[in-house]
Amino acid sequence: MTSNPVALAVFAVLFFGAAFLGTLAMRLRPRGEGAGTGTAHEEWGLGGRRFGIWVTWFLVGGDFYTAYTVIAVPALVYGQGAYGFFALPYTIIVYPFIFATMPLLWRYAQKHGYMTAADIVRGRFGSRPLELLVALTGLVAVLPYIALQLVGIQTVIHALGLPGQIPLIVAFLSLAVYTWLGGLHAPALTAFIKDVMIYIVVIAAVTVIPMHLGGYGHVFDAAATAYTKPGTGLLLADGKMMPYATLALGSALAAFLYPHTLTGVLASRSAQTIRTNAVMLPAYTLLLGLIAMLGYMAHAAGVVVARPNDTVPALFAAIFPSWFLGFAYAAVAIGALVPASVMAIGAANLVTRNILGARSGREHDAREARIVGLLVKLAALACVLLLNPQYAIWLQTLGGVWILQTLPALICGLFIPWLRAPGLIGGWLAGMVIGNWLVFSDGLVPTHSLAAIGLPWTFYTGLIALAANLVVSLGLSALLRTGRAGVQPRPAL
């Protein structure tokens, strides 16, 4: 695309303005009751554990519904049609899961001063090997997620007509300074700005674009005509039903096991804050449904792109004036800044507390976490600069399979007091081996056909691996159980 000076100017003012505001977040944070009672690491990495209902709503929504969501969901709908809407039931299923489990995790973490999933697992089972496995799984699962946020920024930068990688590096430096100085307070502050901008963009898009194209009837007619490949269309094909349902279920179970989403939960002020947010957060699902519709609108607008990720930028460039184009691209880029920061903080917490081991000295821990967070972002930047972005997408697909294997230790451990660490380690190993083998044997497609064992279904691979994990974890734990000796106590419900 050719350079658009007006769009570029609006984009730069909004994006760098939000980044600068984030760098001031630690100084602007509330000084009310409870301020300053935690360690410096807790202040930087969990916001002092005092975010209320509204801050938590914007923060969790901000790092759950990312910039890559705005780019990738319409791109999937553009390419495959109805199958791309799996994200809607997924984000509906996830909230009862949050309501039932996350307050329990929060109470346990709050009581013992834990900051990560691996902290909680170590406290529950007293196993250093299991702690390391959970920490390493979370780290490798979140790294491609950070890379995809940078891909989102890269996509809108290229859409603005800026060639080369220097603009992306400048955006990365903004992210690095933003996170280093602001900690979790930075995305908590700017998530509000990001969400307001995204809502404005989406409402304008679903109102103006159909009017420009002749109404929603024409949008659906044009999209239906465009889907000519087998398995695509406005309705799910027969063979897509089970993959659609199991992918939605598996994605819902995995969503709040990631370090960044769990960080937003553990930063909440109370268990009631989490429950209230589980009731309020479905408002984002409505927004996501409207975002997905952009894939249909792109067909109606005659948009043709070389890469699916260019669908939304190309659609906006074809419809909106330059000033609003800059506003929309800035919303997407800030939508990457917020979750990428939380992801880097969550990864840094895992490394400093669980992989390297917590060190003595409050300031030292916070400084170490900042350095690790910077290194994590550098690794993600290297993935974008040196590798085909498709590799990051493949790794993110694998990340969902990987992170699901921490569910038995983290979640089932809350409800099944006789689970034992050796059994959970065996289950994790079984799930990882089976999950990776199936994904690679299927050509990095995240679904697997069960026709080889006589079943006419195709399932999400992560759920198949999780089923194997649970069988081994429960079986070995039952064999290792000797009376009530060493049984972990059930948490207060």
Image (cartoon, grey):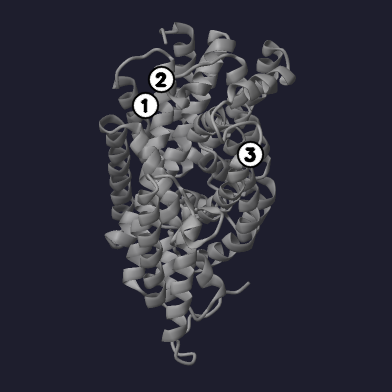
Dot 2 and dot 1 residues touching (CB under 8 Å) = yes
Q: Quick one: label 1 or label 3, which is nearer the N terminus?
A: 1
Name the residue tied to disc 2: 157
Image spot of residue 55 (x, y percent) = 59, 44
Image spot of residue 358 (x, y percent) = 31, 62
Q: Nearer the viewer, residue 42 or 448?
A: 448
Residue 229 seen in the current view: yes
Q: Residue at left 59%, top 42%?
A: 86
Amino acid type of the residue that numbered disc 1 sits on in the rendered structure:
Ala
Q: Nearer the viewer, residue 400 or 325?
A: 400
Q: Determine whether, in the image, residue 323 is placed left or right of residue 124.
A: right
Q: Residues within 10 Å of mark 1 (few under 14, many from 20)?
A: some
| Disc 2 element | helix
Q: Quadrant of residue 178?
A: top left
Amino acid type of the residue that numbered disc 3 sits on in the rendered structure:
Leu
Q: Which mark is residue 171?
A: 1
Q: Is residue 230 above or below residue 491?
A: above
Q: Residue at left 51%, top 42%?
A: 63
- In the picture, the quarter occupied by the N terminus is top left
Name the residue tied to disc 3: 236
Q: Determine whether, in the image, residue 43 is placed left or right of residue 288.
A: left
Q: How far apart are labels 2 and 3 at the CA level? A: 34 Å
Residue 112 seen in the current view: no
| Disc 1 element | helix
Q: Nearer the viewer, residue 169 or 436?
A: 436
Q: Quick one: label 2 or label 3, which is nearer the N terminus?
A: 2
Dot 1 and dot 3 residues touching (CB under 8 Å) = no
Q: Residue at left 48%, top 92%?
A: 483
